[in-house]
Image (cartoon, coloured by chain):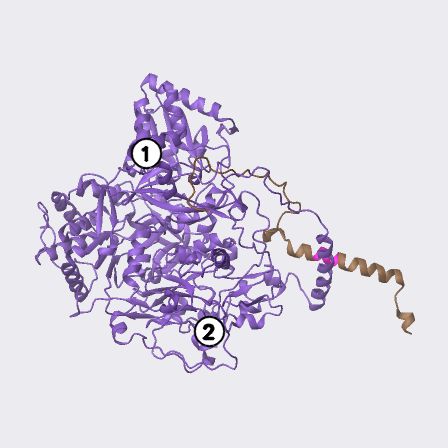
Amino acid sequence: MADVNRKPMMDRAAALVAGPFLLGQRALSLVFQPDQGAPPKTLKEAPSRITVTPPEHAIKRRG
Amino acid sequence: MKTRLPEHGPLETPQYWRTLEERLETPEAQRAAHDEFLPGAAPGTFDDVHGLPPSQSGFSRRDFLGLVSATAALAATVACDRKGQGTVVPYTRRPVEVVPGVANYYASAFQEGRRVYPVLVKTREGRPIHLTGNDEHPGVKGKTSPRTMADVLRLYDPDRLRAPKAGGRTLGWAEAESQLHAVLTGAKATGKPVLLISGAVVSPTRKALLADLKAALPTLEHLAFEPAAGDAAEEAAKASYGQAVDLQPRLAKAKVILSLGADFLNGEDPESLAAWGAKRRLKNAHEAINRLWVLEGPLTLTGTNADQRVPVAPSRLGAVAFALAKELSTKAVSLPAGADLSAIAVGVPQGVDIPAETWSNLVKDLQHAGRNAVVLCGAQMPAEVHQAAHLLNAMLGSEAVAVRAAEPLATVKDLEGAVQGMAAGHYAALIFWDVNPAYAFPRAAAWQEAVAKVPFRAWIGQVEDETAAQCQVLLPENHWLENWGDFTTEHAEVLQQPTIGTLYDTRQGEDVFLGVIRALGGHAPASYHVYLQGRWQQTLPLGTTFEQALHDGLVTSESKAATPAFKGASVAAAAQHAAASKSEGLELVLFPGFATHDGRHANNSWLQETPDPITKMTWDNPVSVSVQDAKALGIQEGDFVTLSLEGATLRLPAVIQPGQAKGVITLALGYGRTTGGVAKGVGANAYPFMGLDPTRANVRGGARLAKAGGKKDLSRTQSHHRMEGRDIVRSLTMDEFAHNPKGHYHMPELVSLYEDQTFPDHKWGMVIDLAACVGCSACVVACQSENNVPVVGPEQVARGREMHWIRIDRYYEGELENPKVVHQPMLCQHCDNAPCENVCPVNATNHSPDGLNQMAYNRCVGTRYCGNNCPYKVRRFNFLEYTAYKTEPEILVNNPEVTVRPRGVMEKCSFCVQRINDVKIRAKGDGRAILDGEVTTACMAGCPSDAIVFGDLKDPKSKVAQLVNASRAYRVLEEVGAKPAITYLADLKNPAVEGGPHAS
């Protein structure tokens, strides 16, 4: 009887792949709700790095 | 929970309360007392954590387990992503001054209005990251103000203007300056006036530069505008001394201090706070203590520290102060020549509710203290109150206040004159230099209309503001940490030097004006650095070099200027005015915001999120209403009200403030900005309520308040992290301290099944003296800067999710109308038997061999059991990702010694473990033991009144080890047996007692 109730192999494989995928999608939709201050879906282009230069003529106390 | 408290708790202790609801024991307060966290911060469901309405997710256990497996799969996938991968590369050519991993310190200085703060700037890899006071300065002695410490964040403000602009177009400096030069050359040729509006001038070299500019451009007119400085103080100084003056309290010499609405303990004046702390950190009752009398309308931080406080409306303070002078004059305290008090009657003025006994004690105190008494007046009080304070100090011959001549400031009346000049087409050009009158001038519409009639407007500043929006040419200015400058202080000439090269294509304002002088045919050096150095070389004392002065940040000097003489003839008119002064309707007091000051700090998120020391509000400026007025008007906490006065109307939320005088309402300035990524839309702009009469611009009678319907969910922290009304805060009077130094408390006998932990080398501990702590929040800001504490925003604060590692709990005791107040800094107590450690399922929080309760962030899985089990409610959970999405320039302020915590991680005070390890490594390198006082936590270093002492409890000679055995010492919730490493010393109050001793 157990063999009769068992799902075909392809169904089981599909469930194994699709289950986490669908749940993952749901998790993302829960976490990143637009009104919850979520980060944008695509991150903004990172601004160019700011060059930090030492001060001219300054005298440090210690370091 | 209260019923389960052990019997050995406090016996007859005063009942302290933090909110009105607690005091009135409403059902909500009783329910809240049993809930350890606000709903938003409580360990709850998935919905709570993610801020969803309760039923939105419909999340079941089955779904949860499914989600966990999916998340694991996704996490594994994401972990394969190469995005966000950083690269560590060595310098190809290392700057001489920079050694990776080693901090550099530079002396510099910060100016806010007429105040100057000498500072020491810590830089890492070339980035300024933390500020403290300059320890070489004889006045501030290593201390500074909360706003100064927070101003390092402004250097990295992403809203900073990065290049010159004209007509909305970015352009080069040469083109922008040529436009300015052409207009000024034309104005010089035609003889048409040019108006320059700047902030206060307290720099001798800037003053010289402005004189050179005036010589090159004779038609230049200059106004120094500081909207929060208090016009009334300026007017009163002119009347009493014939010139502008700057008053510096010398509280070390004061035995009796009378404050007439003066908030000198609000954190702005580190010198006064240090002197105050020194007089309050008593080892025994035989040591001398001062006495602070406070007469005020609003409840100020100074009022909360008073030994005797009486609520008095500001409009009646003048009459009270002159009545005091009259009374003293009948007791052999002579009036200055020419002073006439015939308009004043002896005794408490009519309509002022001061008990006869209190009045008598105050008069005796002032009389007996004589020159060791001082009367201080709040900058916002009406001019006649200032004049009365000047008179009282002159009568007493007070040595506890230094009066110095100062550069005059423009009042609102002067600005009104300028507006009329603009409207009449008087000016060829306007130049705004680091000021924002378009926001701060009371008649904004008239200002805008008048400014539009001036053909050319130029703006020099950092972040485009309301004034910049009215200008054609915008010239971006350096942050002061990129600038050269100098300032005159009471004890020293102070230097400002850059601690980083300019981040953007900006210049300092002085360099712009040197360019103007050259363009107009004058002679000026190529840079302000050369100009400044040239002047300093001429005045340096023999044997001191400019480089040495830069190294120290100052050259000590004592002011040789004569003290301005008090003019007795000014008294009669002021006394008459004060006697006749009365307020109709509600009296509105406008004062600078604790976080925002006059609005210049409104774009600083650290300050916006620091709770106001009195109201505990963040991110807002509600109107404060007295308990009596709220009852009469039916106003509840958070109710929207309509505030109206002479045509100006605002709809804003109300808070009910215990201790505020009846008939007085207060509103903070500096909010309601219309520009700035942080500042825009936070709170309401109160400047339209400022009066055009400079003698009482900040105190306005005839205000009307009415309920407007609706309620606001206030971002207020005073009910957060409550500890169920247990015996937490202790306060003693001097009489109790003399006769029963432990108070009415007794130490419970603690029994433990466990053996005491042993500490082989060190046992770090802390002592906090509540008598010295004034509640100024300097420690909160210092900790935020040192430990990369994130800002969460008003919505999250309202949910109880603020992240500060140290908070100041403010407790009231006694009557609603005038309660006693005690402030208590609360941070992780680093308990030996830490309840948080036992419940962590992954051992993320554990105990170090030197007594630190430490966190392994990478190990924390965010169960929050530790926060639940902490009796002190000092653990903070990252409910959301507060920092990972920040980019440059914001992240440049981070301290590289402290991990930036991600979402889902619990965090808390670490006793600045990075500082401990730094000292340990250095001591080991030198082959010596760690010295007492060598390790300083950020809160200790930032505390201006030295209320916090940190050190090694295993060293019996250490200061901290000696203080834990003091008679006032106690540990919070000692009865639960957690064995905290922080010891508190009970607060002290020194009220006057009828028949008791008076200061002499």
Residues rendered magenta in the picture = A22-26
Under mark 2, the amino acid is Lys
- Chain assignment, label 2: B
> Disc 2 versus disc 1: distance between alpha carbons?
56 Å
Residue located beneath label 1 in the image: B536
**Image-quadrant location for residue B692:** top left
Q: Is residue A24 shown in magenta?
A: yes
| Image spot of residue B954 (x, y percent) | 43, 69
Q: Which of marks 2 and 1 is in front?
A: 1
Residue picked out by circle 2: B979
Q: Give x and y (percent) for residue B729.
A: 38, 69
- Residue lying furthest front: B927
Chain B, hue in figure = purple
What residue do we see at 35% from left, 46% from top?
B117
Percent of width and height locating residue B144: 37, 50
The chain coloured brown is A
Q: Main secondary structure of the magenta part?
A: helix
